[in-house]
Image (spheres, rainbow, N blue to C red):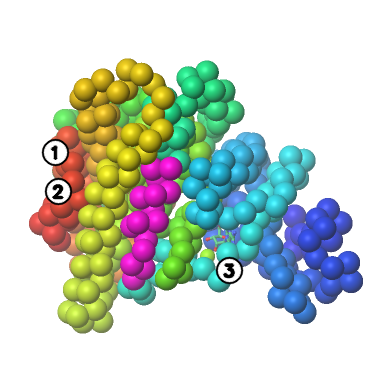
Amino acid sequence: MTEQEAIDYAREKLHYFDEAASLSCKEIGDGNLNYVFRVIDDKTGQSLIIKQAGPVARISDEFIVSPDRNRIETDILRLQGTLAPGYVPEVYHYDAEKNCVVMEDLSDYTILRAAFLKHETYPKLAEHLSTFLVETLVSTSDLVLNHKEKKELVKSFTNPELCEITEDLVYTEPFYAHPRNDVFLGTRHFVEREIWGDKILALETAKLKFQFLTNAQALLHGDLHTGSIFVTQDATKIIDPEFAFYGPAGYDVGTIIANLIFAYVNAEHTSEGPSERESFQAYITTTIETLIDSFKTKFIQAFEAKATEHVARYDGFLEHYLQSVLEDATAVAGLELCRRIIGIAKVADITSIANTEARTKAEITCLTLGKAFILDRAKYQTGTDITNALKGAT
Ligand code: ADP
Ligand code: MG
Ligand code: MG
Ligand code: MG
């Protein structure tokens, strides 16, 4: 779609704007995969978003990705909207021929990664995210769902091509000298020695990859980094769930933790002075701790209220289950910390650090922490387990 085609589409297909309205459109996509059009009524300011998926990734036609991801994104946005009301944009329309979804315009919100680059703080974020995670993960798991219904969902959210991107970019390529990696010169020696040269680390990533491939535990968002989170001081909305599929429940939790850590590390090297640095890092620390500890509390509450599987109520089962989810979350945080430094998809929190020496330090902090999270993943069971490690590595 071009911008003009998006206007025509809005006019002809959607009965949202006044027939005589004068409409403008801008393509505002900044992600790696899709095109995002904002159509606005010049007079009333009424607006909507059309997100369209093409047959290849926006950044590179090397990635052939089925536009069916747009159907998956639509279906999961609708499902998340019922499981966690208020935490996702409202879906207005889906078009299977044009592979586009029409949704609520959240332009009054800010993308969290951009806000974090300015060291802005959002006090309700951890409570909102922990609620979203628990409501979407617990209710789609075998703890709660009838197992046959769950298998129907597994079928419907089978997402082989986007899963392959994750399998390659998160679980595989960063951990050996793959040609697609993109290592910053200052960090190269550390990567060769501490990551690619470590056979024990390689073995643990292999175990984790097989867990990702086979553990259809809960319906995941699948790409929950800070670029997929829209915020205001009062509200949080999660966008871009096209990677959704049935995988290990700790995956989304771990991705968020790692991205909070990138923001913390960014502040270490780019703050205007010690007070900006200290207050932002204290905010991130509290956010990580609240996120993990509220996740646990809310998980237990949701289990008590909703679990239907008889054997899941045997003594000790919930503790076993939750402990393994947190272990997976820590491992995924570790993988994400490594892959955003070594692999092709970078995060601005780190790449925007202009000073070479500071960026090298920042990257080594992330890799050191990432490696510890992968190797010792069972040891991190509380928020402070994670934040103490973070403070120790910075
Ligand atoms: P991709 O899948 O290509 O990463 P995203 O869904 O992340 O696409 O959207 C890319 C960008 O488009 C976002 O960073 C945001 O700036 C904008 N965007 C996406 N959805 C909305 C929305 N509902 N309201 C306002 N802006 C949006
Ligand atoms: Mg943006
Ligand atoms: Mg995106
Ligand atoms: Mg996306």
Question: Which residue type does callout 1 highlight?
Answer: Lys
Number of the label disc, if any, that sits on residue 379: 1
Distance from mark 2 CB to nearest ligand 3 atom below 8 Å? no
Q: Between residue 285 and residue 234, name the one nearer to us.
A: 234
Which portion, as a residue range, is magenta? 121-135
Q: Between residue 271 and residue 169, name the one nearer to us.
A: 271
State how many labels appear. Answer: 3
Q: Position of residue 275 (x, y in %)?
A: 19, 80
Q: Position of residue 181 (x, y in %)?
A: 36, 45
Asked if the stretch drawn in magenta spans residue 231, the answer is no
Question: Which residue type does callout 3 highlight?
Answer: Ser
Residue at 27%, 45% in the rendered image: 297
Q: Give the residue at mark 2.
A: 385
As measured in the structure, the alpha-carbon distance from the residue carrying label 1 to the one carrying label 3 is 40 Å
Q: Quadrant of residue 353?
A: bottom left
Number of the label disc, if any, that sits on residue 209: none
Number of the label disc, if any, that sits on residue 107: 3
Q: Quadrant of residue 128?
A: bottom left
Q: Is residue 100 above or below residue 324?
A: below
Question: Which residue type does callout 2 highlight?
Answer: Asp
Give the farthest residue toward the left. Answer: 392
Distance from mark 3 CB to nearest ligand 1 atom below 8 Å? yes
